[in-house]
Image (spheres, rainbow, N blue to C red):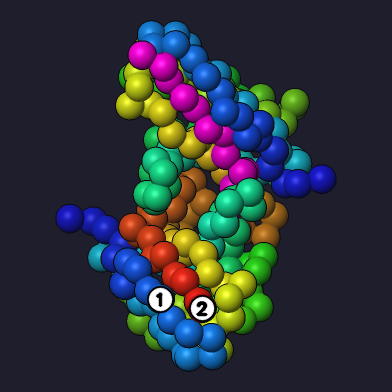
Amino acid sequence: QKEVEQNSGPLSVPEGAIASLNCTYSDRGSQSFFWYRQYSGKSPELIMSIYSNGDKEDGRFTAQLNKASQYVSLLIRDSQPSDSATYLCAFYNAGNMLTFGGGTRLMVKP
Amino acid sequence: EAQVTQNPRYLITVTGKKLTVTCSQNMNHEYMSWYRQDPGLGLRQIYYSMNVEVTDKGDVPEGYKVSRKEKRNFPLILESPSPNQTSLYFCASSTSQNSYGYTFGSGTRLTVV
């Protein structure tokens, strides 16, 4: 089993809709979780971090963490075409390495 | 401006010719790391360093070397590059606490022919 699992997509949503991205992880000891956005050919950019169970909101982005079920999700409200990118979830594993999922490609259609 | 700087951005080389990709950060970060990104395989960690003179293997260290003689620099060395090392490489840095994610450099696209 991979340490981090994401649906590769593409996830296609219309402009203005809510995009929901999900990620499951295997290491129950993980404390810190991150969402990165990566445009094609560019470097990953940190957009959200979450450490506690529940929701964390930042503008149009909401990260949700459920440690008991070992999943973390990212909601993007009022999706815009500029949100079209690959979204990577990541966490620190037991070996202290920041481990990434394969990413979900999001396409927001005008 | 706080940043991680990688050079070169693009590199085409021939099999067996030693090369070095430089990485420098100006944020006084303890942690630095190298990743490679390949289609379908995602980001995979090559090596990481928790501080000066402390380096550790990641998931895919074969064929690579690193050094951390200064806090700000973390070069990636390919002693004898092979075509299977053709990839997009990212250097990244972070503070010592695991509460923060990495800040990434702009990437180096390497082609080995």
Disc 1 marks a residue whose amino acid type is Ile
Marker disc for residue B12: 1
Quadrant of the rendered image containing residue A70 = top right
Q: Residue A90 location, x and y as percent?
A: 57, 43
Residue named by callout 2? B113
Marker disc for residue A56: none
Disc 2 marks a residue whose amino acid type is Val
In the image, A58 versus A108, the foreground residue is: A108
Q: Residue at image x 44%, y 70%?
A: B110
Q: Is residue B56 left or right of residue A50?
A: right
Task: Establish if B74 lies above or below A25.
Answer: below
Contact between labelled residues 2 and 1, with CB atoms less than 8 Å apart:
yes
Task: Establish if B16 lies above or below B83.
Answer: below
Q: Residue at image x 54%, y 90%?
A: B16
- Give the chain of mark 1: B
Quadrant of the rendered image containing residue A40 = top left
- Judged from the image, the secondary structure of the residue bearing numbered disc 1 is strand
Q: CA distance from mark 1 to mark 2?
A: 7 Å
- Give the chain of mark 2: B
* Pointers 1 and 2 within a single chain: yes
Q: Residues within 10 Å of mark 2 (few under 14, many from 20)?
A: some
Q: Residue furthest top?
A: A16
- Judged from the image, the secondary structure of the residue bearing numbered disc 2 is loop
Q: Which residues are magenta?
A: A99-110
Quadrant of the rendered image containing residue B31 = bottom left
Q: Is residue A104 magenta?
A: yes
In the image, B107 versus B45, the foreground residue is: B107
In the image, A3 versus A86, the foreground residue is: A86
Q: Residue furthest right?
A: A1
Q: Residue at image x 57%, y 28%?
A: A10
Q: Residues within 10 Å of mark 1 (few under 14, many from 20)?
A: few
Task: Establish if A46 lies above or below B34.
Answer: above
